[in-house]
Amino acid sequence: MELRSALRQAALARPAVLTAVLPGATRARLAVERELGDRRWPHAPSPAAADLLVLVGSPREEAPAWLDGTWTALAEPRALVRIDDPPGARAALDAGHAALLRGAAGPERQRARKDPGPYVPGNGGPVRDDGRTPGPTGHHGGHDRADGSAAHSHDTPALISGLPLAERADDRDGLRLDRLHVPFGPVLPDWPAGLVLRLTLQGDVVQEVTGVEVVEAAPAPRPPFWDEPWRQAAAGAPVSRGAAARRRCAAHLDSLGRFLAVADWPDAAARARRLRDAALAGAPARELAHAVERLTRRVGRSRTLRWLTSGIGVLPREQALAAGIGGPALAADGDAWDRTVRWLTEAARSAAACDDPRPLAPDDPAGPRGGLAGRCPPSRALLDVLPPLLRGAELAAARLTLASLDPDPDELAPVAAGEVTRG
């Protein structure tokens, strides 16, 4: 028993972490990612592979059903922490790690000490402290459940133990095959915060997108992080062009990091994220531009990545304009590879302008994903165009298409009253 406990504790020296990010929590997410990178803790690819579940942001409900489903899929020992603001990331991760090590001592010993259970307080406090699975009403698999492992939806014809049954339908070749209704999100690695895609699959082919949803979150204390300089300038606040260029550069590097991770190029993804953090930390423009240029050459010359992403998620300029899309997705006028090259180009150009002290014009609110002066945020149009782009795509190609568009659910999250939302 002692040897088993010692092996568990050794295995948890660097716990695998799964992050569940809510809309409006980009600042906290960036802090968590920096902290995890410093600690060299691995990212878990699924709940079953995770030791520590990190809830980033505040859900509208205290314990939503999708969190219930995710938590249930974690094996013992496990812990959950909630992080609402960037300064609390370090202490919350320390608390979660300590809870894991206590749990590794063995459930018998834990009960003997009357340990409060796997839920540990982050800076936002425990989700539940009674040692049971969280849930708004104590049931598993609510009617609006949206977890990525074993949920059901309104379009599901029948359920057994919460799992949807397959049904038969013709596929694209006229063959009659099983058809599954599967929700993806909101807890997946390198996935837009809080996004849920409800897909109808035949094999690994997306037959239909039956729903594009964003889980509800508590009102964010500030405007969307990536759009902040332009919204502040439009509201009359003094903002320099350099500050806006720095935020744009970091936003595109953040998108690149997510896209490269989905494309299974972890080394380049980590490099893009380190440069993102350097841009936000105020690295000198000359130094940052040189580093971004090196990344641009490395990624832009990758024949493997180009072969992998060419012809996927083709979005012609006319279709983008009709959908109300702007920014890099419009300018790219092409597929996932074209959008990647566009991100690289804009990131390099923005990095060179990070020290520009001239004031940002208040009448040009063009954020990283498009114009901010319209009635709908740019990410709304990026989400609306997903169903036709994903229909008929293989699942891996669908994930690359979504990552190459990279909608920002922060733009759809409510903002607390009194904050700057629009110029």
Image: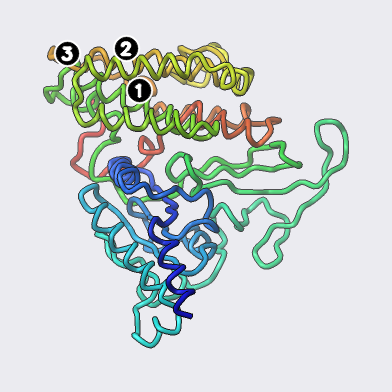
Badge 2 vs badge 1, beta-carbon distance below 8 Å: no
Between label 1 and label 3, give the one nearer the viewer: 3
Residue kind at label 3, given as amino acid type: Asp
Q: Residues within 10 Å of mark 2 (few under 14, many from 20)?
A: some
Q: Position of residue 281 (x, y in %)?
A: 21, 31
Distance, label 1 to label 3, CA atoms, is: 18 Å
Residue kind at label 2, given as amino acid type: Arg
Of residue 256 and residue 321, the one placed in the foreground of this image is: 256
Q: Secondary structure at mark 3?
A: loop
Snapshot colouring: rainbow
Total count of labels: 3
Q: Which of disc 3 and disc 1 is earlier in sequence? A: 3
Residue that protrudes farthest toward the bottom in the picture:
112
Between label 2 and label 1, give the one nearer the viewer: 2
Residue marked by disc 3: 356
Residue 133 appears anywhere in the view = yes
Q: Secondary structure at mark 2?
A: helix
Residue marked by disc 1: 368
Q: Quadrant of residue 396?
A: top right
